Image (cartoon, rainbow, N blue to C red):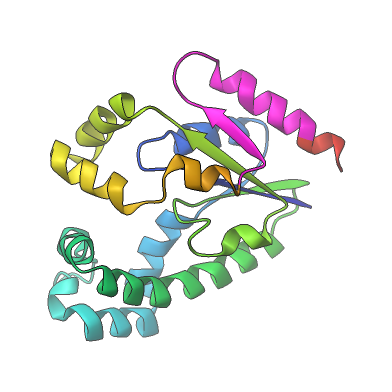
Amino acid sequence: MIKLGITGGIGSGKSTVCSIFEMLGVPVYYADDRAKQIMTANKEVKKAIIDIFGKQAYFLNGRINRKYIAEIIFQQPEKRKLLNAIVHPAVLEDGRKWNASQKAAVTLKEAALLIQSGSYKEMDYVILVTCPPDVRIPRVMRRNKMSKQEVLNRIQSQMSDDEMRQFADFVIQNDGQVSLIHQVLNIYKAIIKTK
C-alpha cells in the first residue's frame, strides 16, 4: 500500500484535491475532521482539553466550542502546544487504525498539520497544495465566516508554503493556471509507477 499525505495552508484547496483523488478510487482520511470527532467523543481527550481550557471549551450538548478555543490558542501559543500534544497522538493512532483497515493500493491522509504533527514521516509521499493569498483569503472569509484579520492570523500561525515545500515530494499549484485534475493525474500516475 502506498500512503500519501496531503497538506497546505488554510484555504489552499486541499479538500478539492482530495475529492479528485477520491474520484480515482483513493480513500481519504480527513485528519482535521477526525480530530474534531475525537475531541468530542474521546473521554480522555475531552477531559484533558477541559483541564486546559475550562468547561467553556464545550457546549452543554457536548460539542466542542471551536471559536472559544481558537481565540485562546491564537493569543496564547503555549496553549496551542498543549492542545496539539493531546490531540495529535490520538489522531495519529486513529489514522494508523484507519489505514490498516483499507484495502486500496493507495491511501491519502489530508491534514493541515501533517508536517507539524510529525505524521508526514509515516507517509511514502507528501503532496503540498499551494494557493496565492489573494485567492485563499476571500475563500476562507466566505467559507468560515471570518474577518480578513482572523484569516490573516490563521495564515501567519501556520507554516509557510516555502517551509512546507522542503518536506513535499509533489507540489500542486492551485492558482487557476493549470488544471487541478491534470496535476492530480500526473502525480497519481507517477506514484502508481513506483508500486
Say above or below: 122 vs 24.
below
Q: What residue is at 56 percent from the left and 64 percent from the top?
A: 118
Residue nearest the viewer, comparing 48 with 128: 128
Q: Residue furthest top?
A: 177
Residue nearest the viewer, comparing 192 with 147: 147
Residue 99 coordinates in the image, percent (x, y): 66, 60
Q: What residue is at 63 percent from the left and 28 percent from the top?
A: 184
Residue 191 coordinates in the image, percent (x, y): 77, 37
Residue 18 coordinates in the image, percent (x, y): 54, 37
Q: Report the span colored magenta.
A: 168-190
Image mark count = 0
Dividing the picture into quadrants, the one containing residue 150 is top left
179 within the magenta span: yes
Residue 42 coordinates in the image, percent (x, y): 39, 77
Could you tell me if residue 7 is visible in this image?
no
| Quadrant (top left, top right, bottom left, bottom right) of the C terminus | top right
Could you tell me if residue 184 is visible in this image?
yes
Residue nearest the viewer, comparing 100 with 140: 140
Say above or below: 78 vs 176.
below
Q: What residue is at 26 percent from the left and 36 percent from the top?
A: 140
Task: Using residue 68 as the reference point, say whether residue 6 is left or right of it.
Answer: right
Say above or below: 23 vs 67.
above
104 within the magenta span: no
Task: Using residue 83 as the reference point, say whether residue 17 is left or right of it.
Answer: right
